C-alpha cells in the first residue's frame, strides 16, 4: 500500500513539474515558427520589391503577420499571428490579428502583411494599444519627407505603411477592413 502511495505521489509530482516545461516548449516552438514565417515573408518581399529593404532599414520598426481568411456567402473572417520588431533595440513583441468581413463571396485567402513604422511613436502605439482598421486602400506612394520610397506600400495610418503579399506577389490593392491587431499575451 505504501509503495502504491509513493508511486502515485512521485507520478503526480513528475506531471506537475513537467507541465510548465511542456508549456514552455510549446511557447518556444510557436515563437520559433513565427520568427521563421517572418524571415520567409521578408525574404519574399525583398525579392519581389528590393526597395522595401531600404525602407525597412530606416524605419523605426516593423511588424509581419501571416493571415488566413475565410468567406462564406455574406460573412467571413480570419485570424493570424505575427511579430513586431523595434529596429533600434531589436525587441520583439508577438501579436495576433482577427478580422471580420461582410459582403458576398466565397473562398479561402492566405496572405501576409508587413507593416513599416516610420516613427517609434507609431510602432509603440501599434504594440501597446493595438490597431484597428476599417478601410480599404489601393495606391502607391512615397512619404514626401525622408525621401524613402515605399514603392508598393500603402499608407494606412499616419507614420504606418503596409505591404500585402499574396501567392501572386505584391498586392495592388490592400484590404484591411474590420481588422484588429493586438499583443499575444500567451507568447509575451
Image (tube, rainbow, N blue to C red):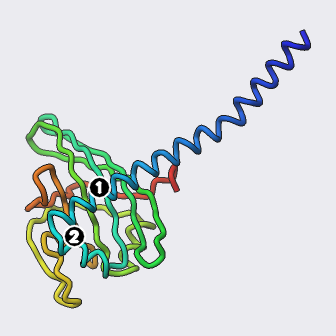
Q: Earlier in the sequence, mark 2 or mark 1?
A: 1
Q: Nearer the viewer, residue 31 or 133?
A: 31
Q: Nearer the viewer, residue 154 or 165?
A: 165
Q: CA distance from mark 2 to mark 1?
A: 23 Å
| Numbered disc in front, either 2 or 1 | 1
Left or right: residue 150 compared with residue 24:
left
In percent of the image, x 45 and y 51: which residue is there?
32
Q: Residues within 10 Å of mark 1 (few under 14, many from 20)?
A: few
Q: Residue 150's spot in the image, x, y percent?
A: 18, 76
Q: Residue 75's spot in the image, x, y percent?
A: 18, 39
Q: Is residue 57 above or below residue 39?
A: below
Q: Quadrant of the N terminus?
A: top right
Quickly name the residue at label 2: 156
Q: Residues within 10 Å of mark 2 (few under 14, many from 20)?
A: some
Q: Residue 29's spot in the image, x, y percent?
A: 48, 45
Q: Is residue 111 above or below residue 149?
A: above
Left or right: residue 6 compared with residue 144:
right
Secondary structure beneath disc 1?
helix
Number of marks drawn: 2
Q: Is disc 2 in contact with disc 1, using a CB cutoff of under 8 Å?
A: no
Using the rendered view, name the quadrant where residue 54 is placed: bottom left
Using the rendered view, name the quadrant where residue 58 is placed: bottom left
Secondary structure beneath disc 2?
strand
In percent of the image, x 22 and y 67: which residue is there?
162
Quickly name the residue at label 1: 40
Q: Residue 62's spot in the image, x, y percent?
A: 34, 69
Q: Residue furthest right?
A: 2
In percent of the image, x 12 and y 77: which residue is there?
141
Using the rendered view, name the quadrant where residue 125 is placed: bottom left
Amino acid at each position: 500500500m505504501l509503495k502504491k502511495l509513493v508511486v502515485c505521489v512521485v507520478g503526480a509530482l513528475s506531471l506537475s513539474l513537467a507541465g510548465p516545461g511542456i508549456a514552455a516548449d510549446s511557447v518556444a516552438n510557436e515563437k520559433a515558427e513565427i520568427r521563421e514565417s517572418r524571415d520567409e515573408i521578408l525574404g519574399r518581399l525583398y525579392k519581389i520589391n528590393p526597395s522595401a529593404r531600404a525602407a525597412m532599414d530606416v524605419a523605426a520598426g516593423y511588424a509581419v503577420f501571416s493571415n488566413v481568411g475565410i468567406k462564406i456567402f455574406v460573412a467571413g473572417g480570419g485570424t493570424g499571428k505575427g511579430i513586431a520588431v523595434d529596429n533600434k533595440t531589436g525587441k520583439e513583441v508577438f501579436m495576433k490579428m482577427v478580422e471580420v468581413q461582410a459582403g458576398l463571396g466565397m473562398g479561402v485567402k492566405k496572405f501576409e502583411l508587413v507593416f513599416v513604422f516610420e516613427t517609434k511613436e507609431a510602432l509603440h502605439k501599434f504594440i501597446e494599444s493595438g490597431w484597428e482598421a476599417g478601410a480599404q486602400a489601393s495606391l502607391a506612394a512615397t512619404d514626401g519627407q525622408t525621401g524613402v520610397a515605399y514603392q508598393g506600400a500603402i499608407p494606412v495610418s499616419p507614420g504606418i505603411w503596409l505591404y500585402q503579399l499574396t501567392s501572386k506577389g505584391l498586392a495592388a490593392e490592400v484590404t484591411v477592413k474590420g481588422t484588429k491587431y493586438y499583443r499575444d499575451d500567451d507568447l509575451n
